[in-house]
Image: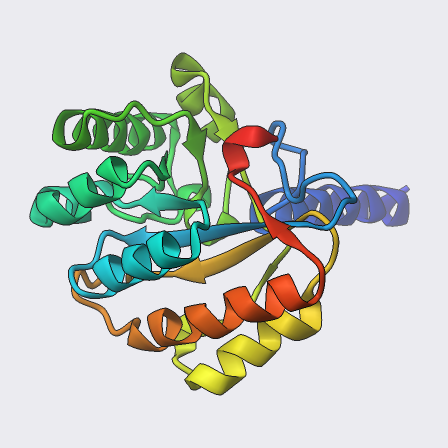
Amino acid sequence: MLAVGALGAGLALGTGMWGAYAPNSRLFGPVIGRGPLEPVVYLTFDDGPNPGVTHRVLEVLEEEQVPATFFMVGKHVERHPQTALAVARAGHEIGNHTYSHIKLHRVGPGRARDEIRSAHRTITAVTGYTPRSFRAPHGYRSPFVAGATAPYGYRSFGWTFGVWDSDCPGVARIRSRVRRQLTPGAIVLLHDGDGYDPSGERWQTAAALPGIIRDVRAAGYRFEALATL
């Protein structure tokens, strides 16, 4: 009986960890990790806004006529309101990425509600855009997150693949990592900011973006916005 109990406890722990750490796990509520199996790619940028980098990303997207979704950190929006407003004016989707980029699997229901509510209010007040999407920092969630996002009618998003551009591995490597992992319906995780440093180094991502767009199109894919899902 002890062995059976230990096995059950282990399974429960493993399931809970999968729900908390796997960005596309549905254990703690619906989440979208990819689009339809069609030749389409969805670009997403986390942890901004970040002056300079975000503006350069916007320039490239405008030049190439590519839509994207920016999951913004509320306190960064407060610090850089003009950059956040530029994203909204460019017509891109803005998502809620919490107020302080906290790891939500480590907090209780009250803090989860506060983080999501504060980010929602800040983004709306600064940009005039009402977020309709949410992505948890690092993809980490808990049983409390679905309830915290429910009042806003958010759709929660994970991602199909990331390329660890936040580690600044070099422009060529960021580009090649995207190219190697292309798959129909992919939601691509990139970063125009640092969740904890509002002026974090993300220039490599901006510099890699033109090549990424060329590679995606050369492979026969088109770009669409998450809102089309």
178 displayed left or right of 68: right
Q: Please name whichever residue, 80 or 228, is drawn nearer the observer in this view of the structure.
A: 228
Q: Quadrant of the N terminus?
A: top right
Vertical arrangement, residue 37 with respect to residue 144, above or below? below
Residue at figure coordinates x 29%, y 74% from the top left: 203
Q: Is residue 195 visible?
A: no
| Location of residue 52 by image quarter | bottom left
97 displayed left or right of 180: left
Vertical arrangement, residue 207 with respect to residue 135, above or below? below
Vertical arrangement, residue 112 with respect to residue 207, above or below? above
Q: Is residue 225 visible?
A: yes
Q: How many numbered callouts?
A: 0
Residue at figure coordinates x 8%, y 49% from the top left: 79
Q: Please name whichever residue, 22 or 223, is drawn nearer the observer in this view of the structure.
A: 223
Vertical arrangement, residue 204 with respect to residue 152, above or below? below
| Location of residue 181 by image quarter | bottom right
Q: Please name whichever residue, 224 or 160, is drawn nearer the observer in this view of the structure.
A: 224
Residue at figure coordinates x 74%, y 39% from the top left: 36
* Colour scheme employed for the rendering of this structure: rainbow
The image position of residue 205, as x and y in percent, is 38, 71
The image position of residue 169, as x and y in percent, is 44, 84
Residue at figure coordinates x 15%, y 60% from the top left: 51
Q: Residue furthest top?
A: 151
Q: Quadrant of the C terminus?
A: top right
The image position of residue 127, as x and y in percent, is 18, 31
